[in-house]
Image (cartoon, rainbow, N blue to C red):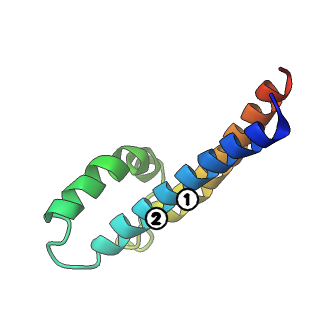
Amino acid sequence: MSGDTILNIQHYISQLGVIYQYLVIAYVLLSWLPSARESFIGEILSKLVEPYLSPFRRFIPPIAGMIDISPIVALIALRFVVMGINTVVGYLLGMF
């Protein structure tokens, strides 16, 4: 494959990662508003984001009993996952 094709695929993967990061941030911000998670948008975001955040919440307890830092760790991990996928895609497609 040509270098431009590989870069386009990596760009799309990066953009999907950024979009998902924004979804996680929006979901976290909804937790600050009363009853916002029960809204239509809150329920959609919950279905998209909660399966990703729940493993982090199992292993990272809240600080002082109420401050949840697991979304921060999840966002950092997501960035590394996207970088890893882009590296693997570049390597695999660069072989052909």
Write the residue at 20% across / 65% down. 37
**Which residue has dot 1 on it?**
18
| Left-right relation of 7 to 75 | right
Does residue 28 lie above or below 44 as drawn? below
Q: Amino acid at mark 2?
A: Tyr
Specify the quadrant of the image occupied by residue 25. Answer: bottom left
Write the residue at 43% across / 44% down. 55
Q: In this view, which residue lies farthest toward the top?
A: 96
Q: Are the residues at dot 2 and dot 1 in contact (C-beta closer than 8 Å)?
A: yes
Write the residue at 76% across / 38% down. 6
| Disc 1 crowd, CA 10 A, few/some/many (<14, 14-19, 20+) | some
- Tell me the quadrant of the picture where the N terminus can be found: top right
Specify the quadrant of the image occupied by residue 75. Answer: bottom right
Q: In this view, which residue lies farthest toward the bottom?
A: 33
Residue 7: image location, x then y, percent: 76, 45
Helix, strand or loop at label 2? It is helix
Residue 2: image location, x then y, percent: 83, 33
Q: Nearer the viewer, residue 5 or 67?
A: 5
Write the residue at 64% across / 44% down. 81
Q: Amino acid at mark 1?
A: Val
Residue 58: image location, x then y, percent: 41, 47
| Disc 2 crowd, CA 10 A, few/some/many (<14, 14-19, 20+) | few
- Tell me the quadrant of the picture where the C terminus can be found: top right
Does residue 5 lie above or below 11 as drawn? above
Q: Nearer the viewer, residue 42 or 7?
A: 7
Real-space CA distance between mark 2 and mark 1, rounded to the nearest whole angstrom:
6 Å
Helix, strand or loop at label 1? It is helix
**Which residue has dot 2 on it?**
22
